[in-house]
Amino acid sequence: MSTIKEVAELAGVSIGTVSHVIGGSVPVSDSLRRKVLAAIRALDYHPNHIARSLKTRKTRTLGMVVPDMTIPFFPQVIRSAETAAHAHGYSVIAVNSDDSTARQKEVLSLLRSQRVEGILLVIASGHGSQTQVPKLIESGIPVVCLDRLPEGIEVDSVCVEDGAAAEMGVSHLLSLGHRKIAILTGPLTLRNERERLRGYKQAIERAGLAVNDSLVWEAKLNQEDVSAVCREHLTHSSTRPSALFCTNGVTGIGALRGMAACGLSTPEDIAFVTFDELTAEDIFRPSITSVVQPAYEIGYRAAEILIERIQAGPTQGPRIAARLPATLKVRESSTGAEVVKVLRGGRR
């Protein structure tokens, strides 16, 4: 295995110059950089980043914890965070918490043992998960929370404007004439779920209607439980809503399964709108009307804020709270195919 000394000899430079090119912390002329990089490629040299981190206390690595990478929203967030990190010379280690408080504690400990310089965190929905955030900050590790935010804790954060986004989706259903609109949420222990419920209620009240608590359904963040909740409420036609709004992708997919189990379809039996994209519009039918979070921007901005915090110091300056707007993509599940053609510029 090649050594840094051999790289320096082949490039005709000092070992210090090679170290500066690899670390990127000290400016090196373009001509010397090219010589060093050519020697690295020729010798297939791989720096010992572990040894270097022990010496410099810098690993140029960020940790990222998400509840479940299989939920379509999170791969986009991870990918964009990696892009932002790479632009600043950092890499990202992404892990699942399985939406478990105990598992979240384990993976945060693992990331700390890997000497990550900061952590991007989507907190688990379990009780006590957010209490782990101040412990990280107190230990000197910068943290940026995204999507799901802890309450009463001063921490940098990035998320969509949850209340306004939900209000936009429900207002769309109201504009189509629906008055009996149910909402299916995830655990209301999560701040973002409560904010989306608040947006639902605000839309209902602004339409001059009273909020019907029997149309507010709460479920765990797994599709089996969501489907069971839907079957419970959709079985009897006398109490069935004319429209359903889901507050996240997991409840959205589970709700569609629950409707199918009851022999119902959208939009014929129930108009349907959900937070987050569920399907590829050009492949699946009916296409799903969605309140779309700017997933790429959320991950990218969160990584940028974290790197800024690392470079400035974890206690320097006020906490940043970035709130991004969502967009509404109207498709067949709320309006029907014919109306969608009109919205796209076609004819009835």
Image (spheres, rainbow, N blue to C red):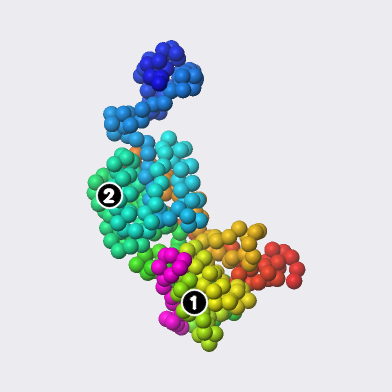
Farthest bottom residue in view = 238
- Mark 1 = which residue? 231
Residue 18 lies in the magenta-colored region: no
Identified at 37% across, 42% down, the residue is 62
Element type where label 2 sits in the image: helix
Circle 2 Cα neighbour tier, 10 Å, few/some/many (<14 / 14–19 / ≥20): some
- Mark 2 = which residue? 136
The count of marks equals: 2
Residue 177 vertical position relative to residue 294 in the rendered view, above or below = below
Amino acid tagged 2: Leu
Circle 1 Cα neighbour tier, 10 Å, few/some/many (<14 / 14–19 / ≥20): some
Amino acid tagged 1: Arg
Identify the mark nearer the N-term, 2 or 1.
2
| Image-based side of 193 in relation to 339, left or right | left
Residue 7 vertical position relative to residue 282 in the rendered view, above or below = above
Q: Which residue is nearer to you in this view: 137 or 288?
A: 288
Identified at 65% across, 72% down, the residue is 336
Q: Where is residue 109 in the image (x, y as percent from the top left)?
A: 29, 47
Identified at 44% across, 82% down, the residue is 214
Q: In the rendered view of the protein, which quadrant contains the C terminus?
A: bottom right
Q: Where is residue 235 in the image (x, y as percent from the top left)?
A: 51, 81
Residue 215 lies in the magenta-colored region: yes
Identified at 37% across, 58% down, the residue is 99
Q: Could you tell me how far apart the alpha carbons at marks 2 and 1 are, in whole angstroms?
A: 41 Å
